[in-house]
Amino acid sequence: MIAKASLELALPSSIPTHCHNVTKLWSRLDHVFISENSIGMVTACDTLTEHRGINTDHIPILTELSLGLVTSEVKPIPNFRDMDWKEF
């Protein structure tokens, strides 16, 4: 399904995302996917182990994207109420 949806793995495969409560071994249960068209926008994708909550076994994942902002010129909108119709 992942390949069919043209998704790529944004979080590198070597980063663990889950600590088992009993064995205390780290594993990889959580994944971050992004479309193949947007993979070039990923500037960072990593886990925040220092922000692990109390009594939780998963850790937060931070994904940063480089999104460009295209601005356009503001064009004046005609105000028909201010028009002098007799002169027009």
Image: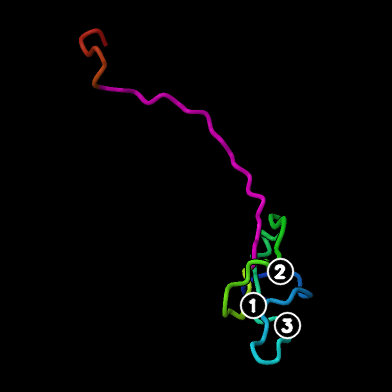
- Identify the residue at horizontal 22%, vertical 14% (top origin): 85
Question: Badge 3 is on which residue?
Answer: 26
Q: CA distance from mark 3 to mark 2?
A: 16 Å
Compare marks 3 and 2 and give the one earlier in the sequence.
2
The quadrant of the picture occupied by the C terminus is top left
- Quarter where residue 35 is shown: bottom right
Which of pointers 3 and 2 indicates the residue nearer the eye?
A: 3
Callout 3 secondary element: strand
Most foreground residue, 71 or 47: 47
Where's residue 27, x and y in %?
Answer: 72, 83
Most foreground residue, 77 or 48: 48
- On whether residue 28 falls in the magenta region, the answer is no
Callout 2 secondary element: loop
Q: CA distance from mark 3 to mark 1?
A: 12 Å
- The magenta stretch is 61-80
Vertical arrangement, residue 78 with respect to residue 34, above or below: above
Cβ atoms under marks 3 and 1 closer than 8 Å = no
Going by the numbered disc 2, the residue's amino acid type is Leu
Among all residues in the image, which is located at the extreme right?
14
- Identify the residue at horizontal 34%, vertical 23% (top origin): 78
Question: Badge 1 is on which residue?
Answer: 30
Cβ atoms under marks 2 and 1 closer than 8 Å = yes
Q: Which mark is residue 11?
A: 2
Going by the numbered disc 3, the residue's amino acid type is Trp
- Identify the residue at horizontal 27%, vertical 22% (top origin): 80
